[in-house]
Amino acid sequence: MTDEQTVQGPPEAVAEYLARGMGELADKMGMVVTELGADRAVASIPVEGNRQPAGLLHGGAYVVLAESLGSMAANIHAGPGRYAVGIELSASHTRSATSGRVTGTCTAIHLGGTLTTHEIVLTDDEGRRCSTVRITNIIRDAR
């Protein structure tokens, strides 16, 4: 994380999560995280390199960004010795991005002991909503 990035949560939970890294897919998509916490997380991806053949950002790219944010936030909430994995996701695409970056803002709806639910709003550079995603994660004890 850089000076421009904000990380919130129990220090040991954040350290454990960050040690895992964001994963290969996030790296390949050019994901940049600017805020990370259980209640709120923000990241963006470039449209270029993540387009479908018609020149629009691929719908799956919106979902990858959203699921990554929701899972990262859920893992911060889970804390040390526990991990969160997605069990349900729904997405509604309402606009197409063709250039620039798409930013996802993840907000907690429910932070429980075994389940978390987050809503992720994805917007283009002009702040227009392109997709809305809801994810539920289950929290498990590490083995």
Image (cartoon, grey):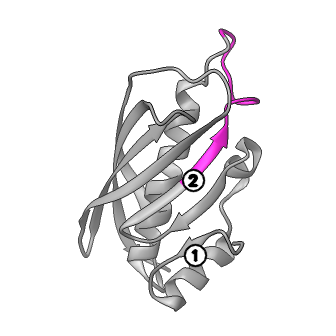
- The circle drawn on residue 43 is 2
Q: Residues within 10 Å of mark 2 (few under 14, many from 20)?
A: many
Residue at 27 percent across and 71 percent down: it is 114
Point out which mark residue 39 bears: none
Q: Is residue 135 left or right of residue 63?
A: left
| Residue 12 is one of the magenta-drawn residues | no
Depth check: give the residue in front, 126 or 102.
126
Segment colored magenta = 43-54
User: Is residue 27 among what the camera can see?
Assistant: yes
Residue 18 coordinates in the image, percent (x, y): 63, 75
Q: Main secondary structure of the magenta part?
A: loop
Residue 26 rendering spot, x and y as whole percentages: 67, 50
Name which quarter of the figure residue 52 lies in: top right
Q: Residue at x 48, y 45 (%)?
A: 66
Residue located farthest toward the top when viewing the structure as drawn: 54
- Mark 2: which secondary structure? strand
> Callout 1: 10 Å neighbours few (<14), some, many (20+)?
many
Which numbered mark, 2 or 1, is in the foreground of this view? 2
Q: What residue type is labelled 2?
A: Ala
Q: Name the residue under label 1.
A: 17
Q: In this view, does 29 lie to the left or right of 42?
A: right
- First of labels 2, 1 by sequence position: 1
Please say whether residue 84 is visible from this viewpoint.
no
Residue 109 at x, y = what percent?
Answer: 24, 58
Q: In which quarter of the image is the N terminus?
A: bottom right
